[in-house]
Image (tube, grey):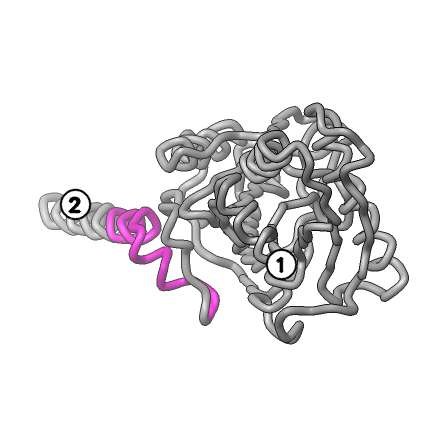
Amino acid sequence: MEFQILKNNTMKNLRLKLSILIVMACVTNPLFAQEMDAEGCKDHPFFNRLENYYIDGCKENYNEYEFMMGNDKTQTLEGNLIDILYTYDGPFGPNLPSKLQVIRNYENAVAKMGGKKVYSRTTDDGGWTGATFHLQKDGTQYWLGIYNLINNPVDQFTLVLLTIEGMTQEITANEMFEKIDSGLPLALYVHFETGKSTIKSESEPIVEALYQMMYENPTLHILVEGHTDNVGNKTSNQTLSEQRATSLKSALVNKGIAPDKIKTVGFGQDQPLEDNSTDDGKAKNRRIEIKKI
């Protein structure tokens, strides 16, 4: 009788252990986590999912986003925006990653693709916590934010990826001169910070080529025209186009070109090259035109 009771208890314990193992296998299996994903949501192909996290929600649209760039410093960027909310659904304890582990995971992934970390903060004083990364591939810019890390260890965080399809342009000083010397306008896709007249470092090769053209042709005088897309209001776009033309002139003057050889004007959104109804059209309309005078 005692043997039978012992045998029954042993079988119950085995069944209980087997059930626990099955449950643990499910919650630690990445495929099981993916089955819990919100409908229509998936990982971005650049980044592998952290183990035991599922997608609680997502959205994708063309929009602006304010990225953290330093202590009390942000930058608003515009482009195709993907927002993914990840939630932890695995066993709690040592398997649950810390804020630093989550950030390091994405930092390593970005570094392997040639990108870099711009800013991160992982303190637990109630302030902002997260990290911002930048990556450029094939002329396209990617800004990654790992934000809203809830608790430490982390049971929820947001991945934000903004894609900026840039107008990539490679042109020599000779090609520039041949264009404007023939009487045709030269469209240059100088990249400025969003809504500002600050020239981005990635456009330095274009600025340098323009300087070389002016330096090699000392009698040349040019007109620098600023043009925008139709995002925002007409008055602010007019002002912005003037400021951007002046900014390019200042960059050339700082390199040694005489100020009286360069005139500037802004046309705002009034002279588009393409239809502003598409992102590609907007990108082509945001330009600087150079003309020989």
Q: Choose mark 2 or mark 1, whichever is in front.
A: 1
Kind of element beneath mark 1: loop
Identify the residue at image location x=81%, y=55%. Answer: 266
Disc 2: which residue: 10
Is there any visible trace of residue 132 in the rendered image? no
Front in this rendered view, residue 244 or 182: 182
Which quadrant would residue 222 be assigned to in this image?
top right
Disc 1: which residue: 183
- Identity of the residue furthest to the right in this view: 235
Identify the residue at image location x=47%, y=57%. Answer: 55
Amino acid, disc 2: Thr
Q: Is residue 27 magenta?
A: yes
Kind of element beneath mark 2: helix
How busy is the neighbourhood of tag 2: few (under 14 within 10 Å), some, or many (20 plus)? few
Q: Position of residue 226 (x, y in %)?
A: 75, 53
Q: Are marks 2 and 1 in contact (CB under 8 Å)?
A: no
Identify the residue at image location x=68%, y=44%. Answer: 192
- For the magenta stretch, what is the residue range? 20-39
Q: Position of residue 140 (x, y in %)?
A: 48, 49
Q: Is residue 136 magenta?
A: no
Q: Position of residue 257 (x, y in %)?
A: 72, 29
Task: Name above or below for residue 85 compared with residue 174.
Answer: below
Front in this rendered view, residue 43 or 153: 43
Amino acid, disc 1: Gly
- Identity of the residue furthest to the front in this view: 219
